[in-house]
Image (cartoon, rainbow, N blue to C red):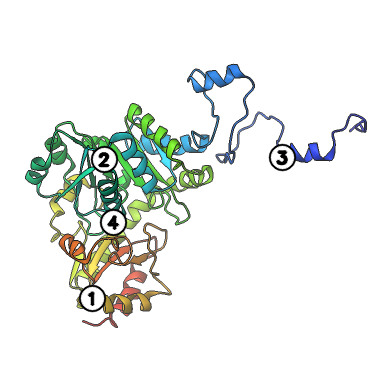
Amino acid sequence: MSATDPASSPDPATVAARAGCAPEFTTKSSSPPVYLTTAFDLESLEQLEAVTGGGQKGYIYTRDGNPNHDAFTNDVATLEHAEAGAVMASGMGALTAILMAMVKSGDHVIAARVLYGRTGQLLDHLATNFGLKVSYFDVDDLSALKAALIPETRLCIVESISNPLLEVADLPAIVDVLQGIPLLVDSTFATPCLLRPIDHGATLVWHSVSKYLNGHGDVMAGIVVGPTNLIRKIRAMSSLYGVNANPFESWLASRGLRTLPLRMQRVSQTATEIAAFLQSHPHVSRVFYPGLTDHAHFDRARRLLPHGCGGMLAFDLPGGRPAVDMLFRRLADVIPFSPTLADARTTVSYPAGTSHKFMTAAARAACGIGDGLVRLSIGLEDASDLKRELAAALAHTPM
């Protein structure tokens, strides 16, 4: 290597400020790269116009778009049989962008009564503070849904499998009642491996990416997929309200997505076995799992979820909150109490104190969420180990 002329060599401050960029090369990375950048450099004003106008594929500012965003959303859209997708900083960030794109003051949104607690909390907040009209219906009472529809109804929100009682929404029947009103389905519990709501007439599908799509408990993100024209509006709201996803989180989610089918098959099989075990345990009064024959939606689940019902289940302890506390203490070293779900490890949670604590006790009771309800997220462990650990802990719970 020839020596650099000291007279033409840049100052150390200049070298340091511009450091870190590798020369161009022709081989491709065997693992998708991470684009950890705030912005993207442009060659000219002409290129700026070409990129912003859509004539040239490119990126400008990560809040508006990033290759890692596109890689993840394209894959999820393909899995869900959707045209396009948008990824946000969390599941609630995705819902915020959806609502900002689709409704305004005076519009009406109707939602299933049993939902993730924060979903209902956001809807109620918008109703109280911004004049959105919100009403709720029982997913099994389609006559009530029909009666609640008004000219201002702009959106219906349901969960494919509800949190935490594992109700299965009859999506085709709901779509028939809506008669063209857009249906947004939170399919976090089902994933596209078990159910594709768009195939049943839904307009948009929404996931907390932090859960099964990533599957490793190390990501905070949300995604919505659906028609290109609507996703474009939602993505614009995501940028405007600043709820866009982080590129590294999107990259992690893409990595997790690679094993999604294997994980969903595994947790569905294990959850079915654990649900049957809990159903026969004397310290458990009731088990909620749509794969059990006594579940109210068993036949519906067989029709809509032929490949399994997923890894989520819930069960009631007759001893109420004291029994739950004892169970969690006994399980702490093996099946921890963690207010999330769909990790690679099995976890428990307490809906009345976490996901649905924002509801009044009366409202929770009306939904069937009592003080003895435990939500169990099945992981990738061996089923026999889980049964042994659960049995040992349940033996100490008060009746």
Residue 177, given in percent of the width and then of the height, sits at 12, 37
Q: Using the image, determine if residue 320 lies above or below residue 45.
A: below
Q: Which residue is mark 1?
A: 320
Circle nearer the viewer, 2 or 4: 4
Q: Which residue is mark 3?
A: 20
Kind of residue sitting beneath label 1: Gly
Mark 2 vs mark 4, CA separation in Å: 16 Å
Left or right of 244 on screen, residue 177: left
Mark 2 vs mark 3, CA separation in Å: 44 Å
**Local crowd size for mark 3, using a 10 Å CA cut-off: few (<14), some (14–19), many (≥20):** few
Q: Which residue is mark 2?
A: 184
Mark 1 vs mark 4, CA separation in Å: 20 Å
| Residue at 18% from the left image edge and 60% from the top image edge | 367
**Local crowd size for mark 2, using a 10 Å CA cut-off: few (<14), some (14–19), many (≥20):** many
**Element type where label 1 sits in the image:** helix
Kind of residue sitting beneath label 4: Gly
Going from N to C along the chain, the mark reached first, 3 or 4, is 3
Kind of residue sitting beneath label 3: Gly
Going from N to C along the chain, the mark reached first, 2 or 1, is 2
Left or right of 348 on screen, residue 9: right
> Does the residue at mark 1 contact the one at mark 4 (Cβ under 8 Å)?
no
Mark 3 vs mark 4, CA separation in Å: 45 Å
**Local crowd size for mark 4, using a 10 Å CA cut-off: few (<14), some (14–19), many (≥20):** many
- Mark number for residue 117? 4
Going from N to C along the chain, the mark reached first, 1 or 4, is 4
